[in-house]
Amino acid sequence: MTISRWDPFKDMMMIQERMNRLFQETMARQRGQDNPEGGGWAPAVDIFETGDQIIVRADLPGIEQDAIEIRVDDDTLIIRGERPFPEDLKREDLQRSERPFGAFNRTFSLPSSVDQGGIEARHKQGVLEVVLPKRKSSKSGTIRVEVK
């Protein structure tokens, strides 16, 4: 039987992220961003952790790789880009538009355990994956310290 420990801070961070996303989406609708001219949308993101990595996956269908910018400023991961309005459509011909177009920007605070020099990204089939390796820490265990 596996026993997992409850991490209240992790749960609080997840709730905060969901509330921020809900607030952003609500404000976008109020500003008329269901309209393709509105811009300023946020792609859906999953963040998960393995033993030696933190992985960020963002849904970016219809966005070319060269339209995506990824950078780290201080301890913040920034993912930004733009989904252009389709050239084969006229805005006045749209009956309904639920797919957002225009610029997007997502930012995430990085924990100090991330090795910023080893960050890698892949873009495949409309999914961006950013791999954030963790720093190699000294092995834990028992160390005998001699008292002098």
Image: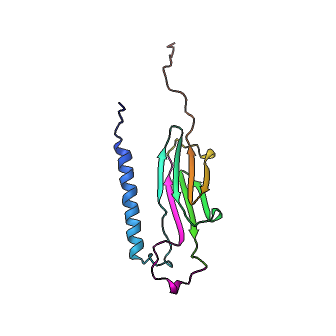
Question: Going by the image, does 29 lie left or right of 120?
Answer: left
Q: Quadrant of the N terminus?
A: top left
Depth check: give the residue in front, 145 or 148: 145
Please determine whether, in this image, residue 139 is positioned above or below residue 123. above
Q: Is residue 129 magenta?
A: no
Pick the front one: 116 or 90: 90
| 7 relative to 58 in the view: left or right | left
Q: Residue at x 47, y 50 (%)?
A: 47
> Where is residue 4 drawn, in percent x and y?
36, 36
Q: Residue at x 54, y 38 (%)?
A: 52
**31 horizontally vs 138: left or right:** left
Residue furthest toward the bottom?
92
Q: How far across and down, in percent of the image, does residue 109 sit? A: 49, 52
Q: How is the image coloured?
A: rainbow
On screen, residue 46 above or below 92 = above
- The number of numbered discs placed on residues in the rendered structure image is 0
Give the residue at the far right of this rendering: 66
> Magenta includes 106?
yes
- Rendering coords of residue 136 (x, y %): 57, 35
Image coordinates of residue 81 in percent, x first then y, are 58, 65
- Residue interval drawn in magenta: 88-110
Determine whether 143 is above or below 42 in the image.
Answer: above
Residue at image position (65%, 63%) is: 66
Which residue is drawn at the image coordinates 54% and 42% (left, top)?
Answer: 53
